[in-house]
Image (cartoon, rainbow, N blue to C red):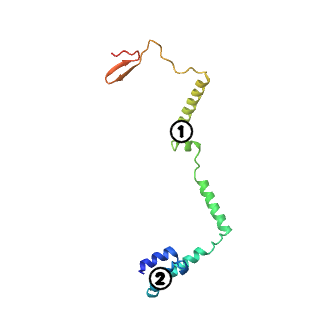
Amino acid sequence: MTDEDFLRHLDAHGASPERWPPELRAAAEAALARSPALRAAREEAQAFDGLLAGTAPEPADARIDRLLSAVGEAARAMPQDGLTVLLLGRMPRRAAAGLSVALLALGWMAGSWMAGSLSGPAALSPPQELALLHENVVTLFDGDSR
């Protein structure tokens, strides 16, 4: 077993020989016997396995209080985004106010039109004609080509 193979298996299976596949254990022991670097790598892996196997230390209440107060201070220092920023994005206040007034007026007009208090778009009177251009030929809606 080469050193690279040993290190790859060490990363995959950990430092405990019980977790290694049985066919690799003898070759791993031989590699450990000949290389002090591999023994040092195994000791580091054992220390890491010990950290993973242990329970996480409980944080101190004072530390939690300090973290919560720091987060609160940072939140109070940061300007809060309002509904306008969420809907319209960041823009100068005058532009946002103008756009809001225009949208409000448009909504009022649309609501009044739907309620019937405003007349709808004016219909074309019969003597008026509309023309469409298609392939350099003017065609009127009365069906005649000119």
Q: Which residue is mark 2?
A: 28
Distance from Cα at disc 2 to Cα at disc 1: 70 Å
Q: Residue, x 56% and y 44% (percent of image)?
A: 86
Q: Which residue is mark 1?
A: 96
Where residue 10 sits: x, y (%)?
Answer: 49, 77
Q: State whether residue 83 is above or below residue 22.
A: above
Helix, strand or loop under label 1: helix
* The one of 130 and 103 positioned closer to us in this rendering: 130
Q: Residue, x 42% and y 77% (percent of image)?
A: 4
Q: Is residue 20 left or right of residue 130?
A: right
Three-letter amino acid code of the residue under disc 1 = Ala
User: Do the residues bearing badges 2 and 1 touch, measured as CB atoms within 8 Å?
Assistant: no
Query: Would you identify the image quadrant in which residue 73 lies?
Result: bottom right
Where residue 9 sits: x, y (%)?
Answer: 47, 76
Three-letter amino acid code of the residue under disc 2 = Ala
Q: State whether residue 21 is above or below residue 136.
A: below
| Mark nearer the N terminus (2 vs 1) | 2
Helix, strand or loop under label 2: helix
Where residue 34 sits: x, y (%)?
Answer: 44, 87
Q: State whether residue 60 is above or below residue 20.
A: above
Residue depth check, mark 2 versus mark 1: number of the one nearer the observer:
2
For residue 24, the mark is none
Residue sticking out furthest to the right:
61
Residue sticking out furthest to the bottom:
33
Query: Would you identify the image quadrant in which residue 69 lies?
Result: bottom right
Question: Neighbour class for label 1 at 10 Å: few (<14), some, many (≥20)?
Answer: some
Q: Is residue 106 left or right of residue 59?
A: left
Question: Neighbour class for label 2 at 10 Å: few (<14), some, many (≥20)?
Answer: many
Please state, as top left, top right, bottom left or bottom right, where the N terminus lies in the image. bottom left
Residue sticking out furthest to the left:
136
Where residue 52 sits: x, y (%)?
Answer: 58, 74
Residue sticking out furthest to the top:
127
